[in-house]
Amino acid sequence: MNLSFLNQWPIEAALAILAGVLILLLPRLLHVMVAAYLIAIGILGLVAFFYGAALPLKAIIALVAGFLVLLRPAVLSYVVGIYLIVVGLLESGLIRF
């Protein structure tokens, strides 16, 4: 199966927009939407890995963060803050794995 469309379609951007709209419409579901978004980003990274791409550390971090937020909603701000810092450092190249 050819998954080259994953590189062409802005799936992560579409998920972010959808999550943002749902959070604005249903603010009580903030932790669920954030968890779902993070888990979806992690799954997309794993799907790409299974079809030959390098395993992105961002995908594993997103999965862990998503399940933490889903299981422990009280740690949402800490998990999201740490996730954003780590992903920012990875994307900027300041840390590498």
Image (spheres, rainbow, N blue to C red):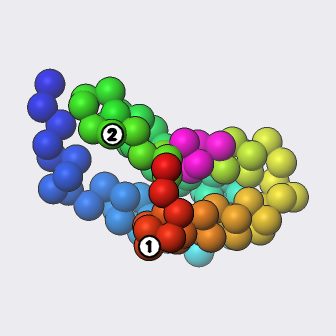
Does 53 sit left or right of 30 as displayed?
left
Whether residue 50 is visible here, answered yes or no, is yes
User: Of 71 and 90, which appears nearest the observer?
Assistant: 90
In space, the residues marked 2 and 1 are separated at their CA atoms by 18 Å
Q: Could you tell me which residue is drawn at 59 percent across and 48 percent down?
A: 61
Secondary structure mainly formed by the magenta segment: helix
Q: In the picture, residue 9 is in which quadrant?
A: bottom left
Describe the element under mark 1 as helix, strand or loop.
helix
Can I make out residue 36 in this image?
no
In which quadrant of the rendered view does residue 10 lie?
Answer: bottom left
Check disc 2 and give the amino acid type.
Ala
Outermost right residue:
74
Label 2 secondary element: loop
Residue type at mark 1 is: Ser
Q: Is residue 60 above or below residue 16?
A: above
Tell me which residue sits at (37%, 58%) in the image: 12
Question: Exactly how many numbered labels are in the figure?
Answer: 2
- Which residue is nearer to you in this view: 74 or 90? 90
- The span shown in magenta is 60-64
Q: Residues within 10 Å of mark 1 (few under 14, many from 20)?
A: few
Q: Residue 2 sits in which quadrant?
A: top left
Above or below, 32 against 3 in this view is below
Q: Residue at x 53, y 63 (%)?
A: 95
The label number, if any, that marks residue 54 in the structure image: 2
Q: Which residue is mark 1?
A: 92
**Residue 25: x, y in percent?**
58, 71
Is 90 inside the magenta-drawn segment? no
**Disc nearer the start of the sequence (2/1):** 2
- Residue at 25% from the left image edge and 29% from the top image edge: 51
The image quadrant where one finds the N terminus is top left
